[in-house]
Image (cartoon, rainbow, N blue to C red):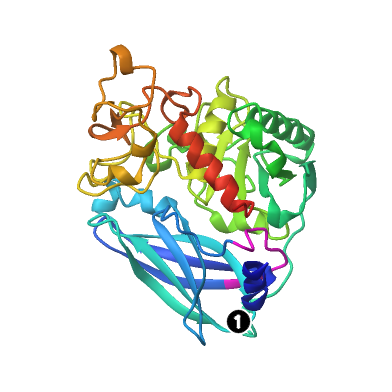
């Protein structure tokens, strides 16, 4: 109760949405404040206010102005961070809009947006500003209220993971299909360990955004659709990489909906998807591998899990991971600081690195190849949902369970 009282001392049960721009290129980045909005709900933890995980390429840190005390923190990823590792970022400078919610403060706070350096893995401030909760520059207006269907309700928002499906590329005439698709995806999630055993820790809602046209952009083929969230394939030039850069539209869609995790459900049947930690995940509704892609991408966005494959085409250059730094994701390692990863789970006498054949092939080890690189990065299992749609391995399972516990305020 003491920690919960700390929330009520510093915050209201509302959100402050921070819209900001990240600008730069492969060599450097900067940040600038764009807008502040008060929104009517806070669905995150109220006892665990600071996030000790260190997950994400960015962190938002909130300090009480009067005392300097850290009263809230959370990590997250962005598409801009990924773009900075592409060949395009070597020759262009761009600016991308991003958005992050924090609890609405009762008194003036200092907000810091920090970015992680690839050189040493540490966070450095990109933007620092004060927020006076009485400021006339905080937008307090209402936005469009979209139809919300409750697919599962198991309890009060602060004690549950609030998962929201957003309709993308569904016309007014296709909203019944959207709800059927969202129910199918809900069933798929809770048929997957470890989510099956933790179903009672989730509330699930579907927000029925209406698009003017069905489907999504396929820019590489010259196809563009007028949709609610402006999604499309060919992110960074990859035909299967489906995302939306329009994070404002995404946040506008959930302004009045309890929301800890977002999955954008796209009304299309071509293979594709994407997921960024504590940002959103996205995937198509009707491909034959839809359910497995959904679980994989949700692993990224919900639990901060890294890709474990290393032979597929990607847009990133060799610098996506610095092999001299331990990556923050819980399911890959460069062995720089393996003790912080799954060393405690390894069976005795397991060789490090571990041969991917013979007696070790079916168990937990340290297998070379992951994070888009065949050499220098290691994964816990030969096969896993984060590599080739096998079941989640014990390391990924532990990360998922820890995130559920964090978001549901379990000790």
Farthest top residue in view: 358
Q: Magenta stretch: give its range.
A: 36-47
Farthest bottom residue in view: 66
For the point 69% across and 53% down, the residue is: 159
Q: Is residue 44 magenta?
A: yes
Q: Nearer the viewer, residue 221 or 240?
A: 240
In this orientation, does residue 191 appear? yes
For the point 50% across and 34% down, the residue is: 397
For the point 69% across and 37% down, the residue is: 199
Above or below, 126 relative to 376: below
Q: Is residue 361 magenta?
A: no
Q: In which quarter of the image is residue 295?
A: top right
Above or below, 29 relative to 291: below
Q: Nearer the viewer, residue 18 or 68?
A: 68
* Residue assigned mark 1: 137
Judge left or right: residue 178 versus residue 20.
Answer: right
């Amino acid at each position: 109760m003491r920690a919960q009282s700390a929330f009520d001392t510093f915050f209201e049960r509302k959100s402050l949405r921070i819209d900001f721009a990240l600008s730069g290129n492969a060599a450097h980045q900067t940040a600038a404040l764009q807008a502040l909005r008060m929104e009517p709900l806070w669905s995150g933890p109220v006892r665990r206010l600071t996030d000790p995980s260190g997950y994400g390429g960015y962190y938002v840190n909130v300090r009480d102005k009067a005392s300097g005390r850290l009263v809230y923190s959370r990590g997250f990823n962005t598409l801009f961070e990924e773009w900075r590792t592409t060949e395009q970022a070597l020759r262009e400078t761009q600016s991308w809009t991003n958005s992050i919610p924090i609890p609405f403060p009762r008194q003036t706070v200092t907000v810091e947006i920090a970015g992680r350096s690839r050189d040493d893995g540490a966070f450095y401030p990109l933007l620092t500003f004060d927020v006076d909760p009485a400021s006339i520059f905080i937008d307090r207006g209402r936005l469009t209220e979209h139809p919300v269907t409750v697919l599962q309700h198991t309890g009060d928002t602060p004690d549950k993971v609030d998962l929201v499906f957003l309709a993308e590329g569904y016309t007014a005439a296709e909203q019944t299909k959207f709800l059927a698709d969202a129910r199918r995806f809900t069933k798929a999630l809770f048929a997957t360990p470890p989510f099956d055993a933790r179903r009672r820790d989730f509330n699930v809602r579907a927000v029925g955004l209406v698009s003017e046209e069905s489907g999504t952009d396929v820019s590489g083929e010259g196809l563009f659709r007028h949709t609610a969230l402006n999604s499309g394939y060919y992110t960074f030039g990859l035909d299967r990489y489906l995302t939306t850069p329009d994070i404002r539209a995404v946040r506008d869609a959930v302004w009045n909906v309890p929301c800890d995790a977002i999955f954008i459900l796209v009304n299309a049947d071509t293979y594709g998807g994407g997921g960024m930690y504590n940002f959103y995940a996205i995937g198509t509704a009707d491909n034959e591998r839809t359910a497995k892609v959904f679980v994989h991408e949700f692993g990224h966005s919900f639990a901060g899990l890294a890709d474990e494959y290393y032979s597929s085409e990607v847009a990133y250059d060799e610098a996506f991971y610095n092999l001299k730094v331990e990556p923050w994701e819980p399911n890959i390692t460069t062995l720089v600081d393996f003790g912080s990863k799954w060393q405690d789970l390894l069976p005795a006498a397991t060789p490090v690195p571990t041969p991917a054949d013979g007696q070790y092939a079916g168990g937990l080890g340290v297998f070379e190849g992951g994070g888009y690189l065949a050499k220098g990065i290691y994964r816990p299992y030969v096969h896993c949902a984060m590599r080739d749609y096998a079941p989640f391995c014990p390391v990924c399972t532990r990360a998922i369970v820890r995130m559920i516990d964090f978001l549901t305020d379990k000790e």
